[in-house]
Amino acid sequence: MSDSPKLTLDFKGLLCPMPVVKIAQAIKQVQVGELIEAVATDPGVMADIPAWTRSTGHELVALEKQDGKTFRFVVKRVK
């Protein structure tokens, strides 16, 4: 497994629940063990993405506020 994301997505401007909907669709495009990186502007991802990873069994590798306006997260496909 590589530490670099296999897929990088831009969810800027999308409001809840669209970032979760989009990551759920994108996770199917990568292999087990691969990473997806995404950036979003909706602060709701700070709660929504951890909840989604817990409920789906995928791993939240990183979740950070970047510049006061954007949020970056990395998810690892586990199954």
Image: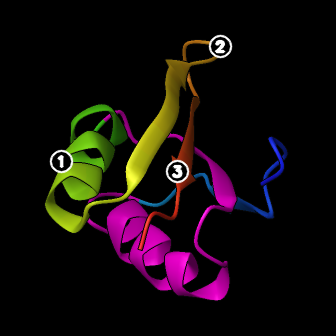
Name which of mark 3 and mark 2 comes first in the sequence.
2
Q: Is residue 1 left or right of residue 73?
A: right
Would you name the residue on which mark 1 appears? 51
Choose top left, top right, bottom left or bottom right for residue 30. Answer: bottom right
The Cα–Cα distance between marks 3 and 1, rounded to whole angstroms, is 12 Å
The spot of residue 21 in percent (x, y) is: 36, 76
Disc 1 residue type (three-letter): Ala
Residue at coordinates 23% horizontally, 66% vertically from top-left?
A: 56
Q: What element carries label 2?
A: loop
Q: Name the residue under label 2.
A: 67
Which residue is drawn at the image coordinates 58% and 30% (left, top)?
Answer: 70
Identity, as a three-letter code, of the amino acid under mark 3? Val
At mark 1, the secondary structure is helix
Of the 4 image quadrants, the one containing the C terminus is bottom left
Mark 3 vs mark 2, CA separation in Å: 20 Å
Camera-side mark, 1 or 2: 1
Q: Which of 4 and 21 is in front in this view?
A: 4
Q: How many C-alpha atoms fall within 10 Å of the one at disc 3: few (<14), some, or many (≥20)? A: many
Mark with earlier residue (1, 2): 1
Q: Residue at x 29, y 53 (%)?
A: 53
> Is residue 46 placed above or below 48 in the rendered structure?
above
Residue with the mark numbered 3: 75
Is 21 left or right of 6, judged from the image as shown? left
Question: Where does the N terminus fall, quadrant-wise?
Answer: bottom right
- Tell me which segment is drawn in magenta: 15-43
